[in-house]
Amino acid sequence: MTETSLFQQEYVRIREQQLIETPQWAETFRQEAMNRFLTKGLPTTKDEEWRFTNITPLLRHPFRLPGYDSVSDSEVKGLVDQAVLNDQYDLHVFVNGWYSERWSRSAEVDSAPVFVSLAESIRGKNDSVGQRLIDRATDQESAFVSLNSAFLGDGACIQIPENTKLSRPIHLVFVSTADEPIASYPRNLISVGRNSEASIIETHVGSVDRDYFSNSVTDVVLGESAELQHHKLQQEQTNALHVATMRVHQRANSSFQSHYFALGGSLSRNEIECVLNGEEIECTLNGLYMPSGKQLMDCRTKIDHAQPNCRSYELYKGILDDQAKGVFNGKIYVHPHAQKTNAMQSNQAILLSDDAIIDTKPQLEIYADDVRCTHGATVGELDEESLYYLRSRGIPRELARKILIFAFANDVVQGLSEPAVRKRLESLLLSDHGLPVL
């Protein structure tokens, strides 16, 4: 059996059982994506981009695509209640990859729906959504993006009209729960119109002691002078596999901020690709990853400075304990005509155990001569002098340790504009083991 056979068999099964509605364009889109996936195959540690991340756990189970109603209401309610950050936020819940109106609540802007589910768009024969998906499909996309497209079913379609400022955030909650190993493939399309502002939060959670695989893709387009703040809380359970790709396209004078927090999953990989295709663009990528036990967390970023006079700022921090492993690879690419680029990148990690490992690779690839670009990486331990100072003031060792860990992560957390997200992260940082306990 080949590495891709389990996914190919599941693809054949869902087609035969017609688990996903298939208008002709979607059927063709899925089949072409599956062909690309089979041609590429799953990445291995022989691939440079996956050298430090072994995905063989994906082959331990035949992850199946669940139906719409194969869940326990009580489990879903408990997970949604835990994930909710603020009762005033618009809430859109996806259960095993499918949108659930029952657990969601939303408002409308100027009588026009800002949110619709992808499945509804496909059923409604929304040609613009179909064309946008087709336009993004290329032979250069990763195997996991192709796999997501092959199982295209549902996700969030968010379209903010021009000259609109949302009064409250949109909170997307992705819940995984089933009695058998399952897979979900959310596909999110986000568009922020010219001169508009929005804040979107993603939370990923799942049932304890369940094996599941989440493979999500989010495509973002920002119009001229648009602003988007995106927050992601990856709080999968310890048996979960989480792979996610976000692709962002920015136009002139737009501003994008990404705040990524990884706390769960046995294996997780989060990729962000930003194309700055206009002048006076600002892009900020912040992240905090906290693996413990035997968790592996892989963070990949790429900022493509395609036009002059743009600015990018990137700060990722890692806190690793026990036998955990962290991977960071950040790349800044500056095109020849992207003069006056200002780019800063930093990855900092603290190892709380002698057995924890971090592989970090900040990269600059610059083809313009009038730029200001910096990058750097630091790896260390908790400062023993600071620990001694706190203990000498009567603070117990474990509490002193937490205070120093909190201080290390604080500049990432305190930069958040959403108080509810900041409060949740502060509580997680101060929890007994730094685990995703809500």
Image: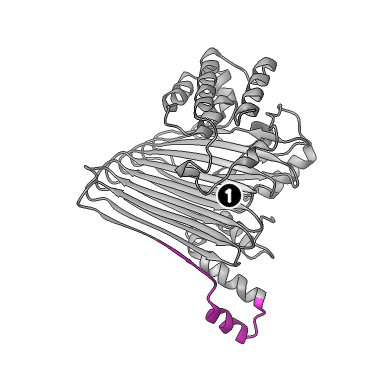
Other residues around mark 1 within 10 Å, as few (<14) / some (14–19) / many (≥20): many
**Which quadrant of the structure image shows residue 14?**
top right
| Kind of residue sitting beneath label 1 | Leu
Residue at 25% x, 48% y: name it: 309
279 relative to 205 in the view: left or right: left
Is 381 part of what is drawn in magenta?
yes
Residue 323: horizontal and vertical position, in percent?
63, 60
Quadrant holding the N terminus: top right
Quarter-of-image position of residue 124: top right
Q: Mark 1 sits on what residue?
A: 233
Report the residue that reaches farthest toward the bottom: 392
Name the quadrant of the C terminus: bottom right
**Residue 117 highlighted magenta (yes or no):** no
Q: Is residue 343 above or below residue 349?
A: above
Closer to the camera in the image, 89 or 28: 28
Residue 82 horizontal/vertical position (percent): 70, 49
- Check disc 1 and report its element: helix, strand or loop: strand
Bounds of the magenta span?
A: 377-397
Residue in the foreground of this view, choosing between 383 and 163: 383
| Residue 38: quadrant of the picture | top right
